Amino acid sequence: MADVAANGTAATASEQEPVAAAPAPPAEKLKRLPRPDEAEYTAKFDKLNSQINAMNARLGEIKEALDAFHDKRKSGSGEQVELRNKLNDEKARAIPSTPDLATGNDV
């Protein structure tokens, strides 16, 4: 695709702006960065890792509490279990058994 000049016509190679030359290398050699301190890195890593472990332990406690709550709701008290069983028995008696169409037997 040809470049289009401001007046809408294609510009020739002689009319295009020259490409800028690569920058000259620096006069003095760049200094190397010092090597990072291993002990400082390890100390920061250990501190952050201990914070993460503490938060994960707290998450575990919260999950256990939620699981205990949900388990308690499912099982309920002795009275609730007894009433639930009676309700299920009544439902089973109220709904007549339906015949299995494949065999003709009651299910």
Image: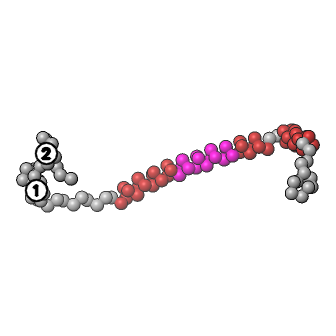
Residues drawn in magenta = 53-67
**Mark 1 nearby-residue class (10 Å; few <14, some 14–19, many ≥20):** few
Is 17 magenta? The answer is no
Percent across and percent down for residue 24 are 10, 58
* Quadrant of res 92: top right
Q: Is residue 34 above or below residue 92?
A: below
Q: Residue at x 21, y 53 (%)?
A: 1
Helix, strand or loop under label 2: loop
Is 62 magenta? The answer is yes
Q: Residue at x 45, y 51 (%)?
A: 48
Write down the residue under mark 1: 21
Q: Residue at x 91, y 55 (%)?
A: 104
**Mark 2 nearby-residue class (10 Å; few <14, some 14–19, many ≥20):** few
Q: Nearer the viewer, residue 3 or 25?
A: 3
Label 2 vs label 1, nearer the camera? 2
Q: Residue at x 67, y 43 (%)?
A: 66
Amino acid identity at mark 2: Thr
Question: Predominant secondary structure in magenta?
Answer: helix
Is 89 on the left or on the right of 12, as rendered?
A: right
Q: Nearer the viewer, residue 29 or 106?
A: 106
Write down the residue under mark 2: 9
Q: Is residue 22 above or below residue 68?
A: below
Amino acid identity at mark 1: Ala
Q: Nearer the viewer, residue 35 or 24?
A: 24
* Label 2 vs 1, first from the N-terminus: 2
Q: Are marks 2 and 1 in contact (CB under 8 Å)?
A: no
